[in-house]
Image: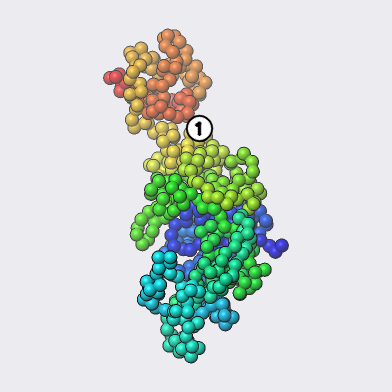
Amino acid sequence: MSKVRVRFAPSPTGGLHLGGVRTVLYNYLFAKNKGGEFIVRIEDTDQTRFVEGAEQYIFDCLKWCGIEPDESPLHGGAYGPYRQSERKEQGVYKQYAEKLIADGHAYYAFDTPEELEKMRNDFKTAENPSPQYDHHLRMKMKNSLTLTADEVNKLLADGTRHVIRIKMPKGETTSFVDMIRGEIKNETDLVDDKVLLKADGMPTYHLAVVVDDYLMQITHAFRGEEWLPSAPVHVLLWKYLFGLDKMPEWAHLPLILGPSGKLSKRDGAKYGFPVFAMNWMDPKTNELTEGFKEKGFLPEAFINLLALLGWNAGTEQELFTKEELIEKFSIDRVHSGGAKFDYEKAKWFNHEWIKELKVDSLKLKVKEVLELNGLTIADDIYLDKVIALVKDRCTLLPDFYEQSVFFFKDPETLDTEAVKPKWNADKQLFFTDWINNLDNLQNWDTISLENSFKELATAKNIKPGELQLPLRIMLVGGKFGPPVFVIAEAIGAAATINRIKKALAIFSAL
C-alpha cells in the first residue's frame, strides 16, 4: 500500500466546533498509527463566507490540542498550494471542469437567479414541493444542453454569467465501500445536477475536494456523515476524471449529539457548555463564543474525551495519552451511530487528567489562572507545593484559584454560620491559649502542629474534632481545602497566628 496521507480540510468561516476537532483527531491518529502524513488544507472556495482571522484560529486550536500537521499553508510541503483560492488562481479547477464538459459529463448553465426561482415555482407540485435542477428539468432550462453550439459560444464570448453543472446520469447506481459503514449505494436519479464551478470561477466543494485529494495523493478521507448525500456526485467525479482506482478510501464519521439531537455551533449558549475548542470572537457580529481551553480544560483531557466520542479501544481503559491513542486507534472500532456528548463526563476527564499530570506540567497554566485573579506569585517552589496539595480537588483550571487563594492571602470572608451553632467561651479560650503555645513550638510542621493542638484539647477536655472545623474556617474561610495542619504548615507561623487572632475577634460576637 502507498504511504498513508490524510487531510483535514476546514473552511475559514468561524470557530472550530468540537466535531471538527474530532475529525482532525481521527485523521491524525490514523495517519500516525500507519506511519503516514497528516495534511491541513484550507477550503476557502466560498469567498462570501470567508472570515478574517479564522484560518489562524484553526491553527491555534490545533497547536493547543498538540496536533501538528506535516503539511499545511503554514508548514509548506510538496503538494501545495494548500489553499484552494491559490489553486484557483492557477486555473486548475476550471481545467478539470472544462474536461468534464468536453467528455459529456458536465455542461454550462446560464440561468439567472430569477430564472432559477421561476423554475422552482413553475414546476412545484404536491408530490414535488421543492423542484431541483436535475434530469427532469435540465432540458427546460437555459444551458449548453438546450442551446445550440453557436448560442453557447456567443454567450461565453460575451462574458455572460454562468456556472458549470455535473450532468448526473439517468438510471444508474453508484457505490463505494465506507470504512465504517460498509458498501453504500445511491441512485443517480435522486441527485440533482450540482454546481461544480461557480460564476466567480471558484469551485464548489464537490469539484474541489476531488481535484485536491487527487493532486495531493490523499489515500484516506474522513468526514462527517452529513456528507453522505454528496457521495454519489464525488464517486462520479472520481470515475470521470481520474478513475475509481485512484479514489481514497472513505470513512463517514458519526454525528456528535447534544441533549436534543445534533450538537450544533449554537448549542453552547443553549445548554451552558462550550462547543468550540477555543474562544472565538466573530468579527462580523462581535459575539464571543466560549471555548474548552478558556473554560479550563486541559488539551490532554480534551483530545482524550473526543477520541472516545465514537471510538473505543475494546477495553475498560478511559484515560489515554496521545501516544496511547496513536498506538491503539483503528478505524474499525469507530461506531456508525451518533455519539452523545456529556458535559459532566467531559469534566470528569479533565478532573482525572489534572490528578494525573505532574506539577511541572500544570505550573504555568495554574500560575496564569492565579495571576489573572490578582495574585502575585513570587516563589515557584511554594507554588509547586500548593499545586501538589490542591490539584486533586480541582475539576477545571479556574478551580485552582478558589482551592488555593488562601495559601497566598488571608480569606476575605469567614463562614461564621458554620461555626456559630457550637461556638462557646471554652473554644474561644482554647484558641487563645493555643496561639500562645505556638510561640514556643520548636518545629513548625504538620505533625508538631497537630500534636500540640490535640494535647491542649485533651487537657481542656474538648474533642479535637469539634475544634478542627473552626480552625479550618479561620485559616481558609470555608469548609474546604487540604488537611488543616498541612495548610498551617504551608502558610507559616505568622500567617496562621494572625488569621486565628482576626477570626477570634469576629467569633467572640457569635
Question: Whole-percent x and y of residue 354?
Answer: 52, 39
Which is more toward the observer, 69 or 389?
Answer: 69
Callout 1: few (<14), some (14-19), or many (20+) C-alpha neighbours within 10 Å? some
- Residue situated furthest right in the rendering: 1
Quadrant in the rendering for residue 469: top left
Question: Whole-percent x and y of residue 312?
Answer: 60, 45
- Residue situated furthest left in the rendering: 509
Quadrant in the rendering for residue 249: bottom right
- Quadrant assignment for the N terminus: bottom right
Which is more toward the observer, 110 or 378?
Answer: 110
Quick check: 372 above or below 120?
A: above
- Residue situated furthest bottom in the rendering: 150
Q: Residue at x 55, y 73 (%)?
A: 170
Question: Whole-percent x and y of residue 261?
Answer: 45, 50
Which kind of residue does numbered mark 1 sit on?
A: Leu
Res. 359 visible in picture: no
Question: Whole-percent x and y of residue 201?
Answer: 47, 77
Res. 425 visible in picture: yes
Q: Is residue 248 left or right of residue 440?
A: right
Q: Residue at x 46, y 63 (%)?
A: 12
Identify the residue under disc 1.
Answer: 389
